[in-house]
Amino acid sequence: MTARELAHHVCRTLRGAGYQAYLVGGCVRDILLKREPADYDVATDATPDEVLQIFPRSLAVGAKFGVIIVTNDSIETDSASEGAEDPPALRVQVEVATFRSDIGYSDGRHPDRVEYTRTPEEDVQRRDFTINALLLDPETNEVLDFAGGRDDLRAGIIRAIGNPEDRFREDKLRMARAVRFAARFRYAIEAKTFRAIQKLAPDINQVSAERLRDELTKILTEGAARRGFELLDESGLLAELLPEISAMKGVEQPPQFHPEGDVWTHTLMMLEMLKPGCSPTLAWGVLLHDVGKPSTFTPPTGPDGRIRFDRHVDVGTRMAEEICRRLRFSNEDTEQIAALVANHLKFKDVPQMKPATLKRFVRLSRFDEHLELHRLDCLSSHRNLENYEFVRRFIAETPAEEMRPLRLVTGEDLIALGLQPGPLFKEILGIVEDAQLNGSIHSKEEALELVRSRLP
């Protein structure tokens, strides 16, 4: 059962029990735009308790706010015995929300209390933007529009429902969501709505780090990252959320390497080339790869001098780690994003690298992201892809057993030679692996001879 089929089933079942039920929100917007919705929501006049009576195996995780989660496995019967060995179906879910009004938002996210209402017209007034306040009767395909959402869809406008400042004070993250929707759909943000964002931008940091991280990641990976970050900048949100990125504006670069302009322009050009659905760590690596340049900028000195950014990679790596910690990234994602920043300049040296160094380089975790960041870096500056193609050829032409050969010498072999585990132990193993990767030794005997030659 697909999410759409589940949503239609939920609506039919609720209506069969005497309640109103409509598809609502982003799924209706996407259906009208002929896009495939990511998820489906249903609005109904049935209370959470009544929904649970109809779908008793549903999840009541949001019941206090009028929301019940109905899943496909909460309504489907067990498979027949002859189908028991079939793989389990992918779990899908539909959020079923009772028509309501939200009263007060002390925490800037959740309503202090909700009051259930009987009509969809009352319900949509609590929603964020007009294009997200449409309802659809799945039986007749009739669209209910109480906020002018269809007109705004046709005009390409993101408009807050009612007073924009009220909507944003209720949930500050809506300011970033307005930017994301405007970028994703190539829409304009209505003037009054935009002015409200500019006025309330300093309040955005009242939102939890996790929610901010997720919203920024969506902006970066939905295929309109450049426009999204331009709008974040114009709205004042960027300076609040990522002042380190805002600091890139006006930071000049040496024109012989960066004819495109300053660090901000270069970064925007890279963001523009990110593919929809790209990995979040790649997207954040692209955003942060030059984050150390503003604080390491040195103007040219002397007649032959040029702009320099000495140690900007080291500085940028530390800054990227701090930003990831601030936004509560997982340790794994933080490590990868920092690695992308730390290694992005190494591509300039690949033709001169020893085989061992190059093999270790391309063995970096998720190296495809390093390679793609380098490609975008080149295309957004000097456009020279020679080193990119050099690495691709090296990977294609180097057998896996040469890239990651079996060890010729183990720790047990070193112990047998009288060595004790310690710093020298690790150093000798590294020397042997270097020689093996460089092709200067090929057998265990040669490796042991190399070890003996290095012993005190």
Image (spheres, rainbow, N blue to C red):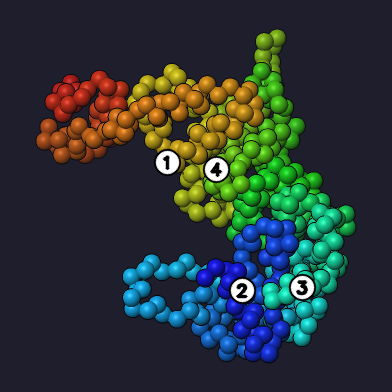
- For the residue pair 305 and 210, the one nearer the viewer reads as 210
Q: Residue at 78% x, 55% y: name it.
A: 201
Q: Amino acid at mark 1?
A: Ser
Taking the spot 61% from the left edge, 56% from the top edge, the residue there is 214
Residue type at mark 4 is: Leu
Report the Cα–Cα distance between label 2 and label 4.
Answer: 34 Å
Residue 398: % across, % down: 35, 28
Work out whether residue 121 or residue 453 is closer to the camera in this orientation and state it. 121
Q: Which residue is mark 3?
A: 142
Callout 1 crowding tier (Cα within 10 Å): few <14, some 14–19, many ≥20: few
Provide the secondary structure element on which disc 3 rests: loop
Q: Which mark, residue 69?
A: none
Name the residue tied to disc 2.
Answer: 7
Question: Which label's residue is closer to the chain start, 2 or 4?
Answer: 2
Q: Secondary structure at mark 2?
A: helix
Q: Which of pointers 2 and 1 lies earlier in the amino acid sequence?
A: 2
Q: Image quadrant for the C terminus?
A: top left
Task: Sort mark 4 into few (<14), some (14-19) or many (20+) by Cα contacts within 10 Å.
Answer: many
Q: CA distance from mark 4 to mark 3?
A: 42 Å
Residues packed near mark 3 inside 10 Å, few (<14), some (14 to 19) or many (20 plus): few
Query: Going 40% across and 26% down the picture, which residue do you hit?
Result: 394
> Which residue is labeled 1 in the image?
365
